[in-house]
Amino acid sequence: MKRVLLVAVLLGCGGARNSPERLGDEAWHRGQWAVATAQYRLVGDIPRLLAKRADAALLGGDLMAAAMLYRQLGAADPTRTGEAAAGLVRVAEVAQRAGDVHAVAACIAGLAEVAPGWPLGRLALRLPPDAQWDPTLVGAIGPAGLASAGGGERWLLALGRGYRAAKRCPEAIAALETLRRRERGPAADTAGAELASCQLSVGLAALGAGSPGEADFWLLQAATADPLGASGRRALVALGDARLAEGDLAGANLLWQQVLTAPVSPDSITVMALERLRDPGVFGSKSDSSVVPGRP
C-alpha cells in the first residue's frame, strides 16, 4: 500500500512539473515570451494567468495583445483593477516610444473601462493631433486631452473630428466653432471644412424632417464655413431645393448657378446643380444652364 502511495505521489509531482503553467514559467525565465504565452493560454482565462499572459505579451512586444489582456484582467477580477491599470499605463508608454498610435488608443480605452477615475490626459496627449480615433474612444480621449492641453487648438480640432466620426455633430460643432473663433490660418481652415460637414448633416436632417427654418440656418452656416469645399457647395444645392419647395424659383436658380460658377474643378456636386437647372419640370426652357465651368 505504501508503495502504491509513493508511486502516486511521484506521478503527481511529475504532473505538476509538466503542467502548462509550470512550463510557461520556465519559458518565461528563458525569455521565451511566445512559448510562455501559449502555455498559459492552455490553463484558461483565470485572472492569475491573464496577468502572466499580459506581462509576457508586453515583454514580447505584442502591445495590442498586452492592452487587451490587461483590460480583460481588470474586467475579470475587480480586486486587480489597479494592477490592470498600471499595466495599461506601461503598455501605453512603450507604445508611445514605438510610435504605435493604435496601441496607445487601446490602452486609453482600457483605462476608461477598468479604471474610470484614472487621469487620461497625459496619455491622450501622446496621440498625434491627426490621429484617426475610433468613435467609441471619443468620450474617453477627447475631453481628457483637451483639459490637459489647456483647450489648445490641436485638441479642439481632434475633439471635433472625433465627435464628427462618432456622428455626434452638436458636440463637434461646438468644439470646431471654438477653434475657429480662436485661431486663424491652416488650423482654422481645416476646422472650417470639418465644421461645414457637420453643419451640412444637421441641415439636411432638418430639411428631411420638415423644419425649413432650422435647415436654412445650418445650411447657410455650412456654405459660409466652407464656401468652395464639397460640404459648402452641397449646402447651396440643398438650399436651392428648399427655395424651390417654397416656390421661389429665382432663389433656387441663383443658388444652383452659384454652385456651377464656383472656381473649382467640376465634380458630382456640380452635376447635381446642373441636373436641377436642366430639369424641364422645374424651369422649362427658361433657365440658362448651358455654361459648365471648366477646370481652373
Image (tube, helix red, strand yellow):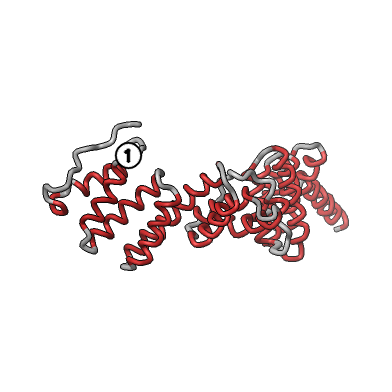
Name the residue at 36% across, 53% down: 235
Quadrant of residue 290 within the rendered picture? top left
Q: Where is residue 269 in the image (x, y as percent from the top left)?
A: 31, 44
Quadrant of residue 198 within the rendered picture? bottom left
Between residues 126 and 237, which one lies in front from this camera angle?
Answer: 237
Q: Which residue lies furthest to the top in this view?
A: 295
Q: Where is residue 31 in the image (x, y as percent from the top left)?
A: 79, 37
Left or right: 294 with respect to 100?
Answer: left
Left or right: 95 with respect to 177?
Answer: right
Q: Position of residue 253 (x, y in %)?
A: 23, 51
Left or right: 73 with respect to 174?
Answer: right
Q: Residue furthest right?
A: 2
Between residues 264 and 116, which one lies in front from this camera angle?
Answer: 264
Would residue 45 be seen by someone viewing this image from the given angle?
A: no
What SS does tag 1 mark? loop
Q: How many labels does the image show?
A: 1
Q: Which residue lies furthest to the left in this view?
A: 285
Would residue 260 be seen by someone viewing this image from the given angle?
A: yes
Name the residue at 32% across, 39% down: 267
Location of the C terminus by quadrant is top left
Residue that badge 1 annotates: 267
Between residues 249 and 266, which one lies in front from this camera angle?
Answer: 249
Name the residue at 77% across, 44% down: 23
Q: Which residue type carries mark 1?
A: Asp
Between residues 174 and 79, which one lies in front from this camera angle?
Answer: 174
268 is higher (above) or lower (below) than 106: above
Name the residue at 59% across, 49% down: 183
Location of the N terminus by quadrant is bottom right
Q: Where is residue 128 in the image (x, y as percent from the top left)?
A: 64, 43
Circle 1: is it few (<14), some (14-19), or many (20+) Cα within 10 Å?
A: few
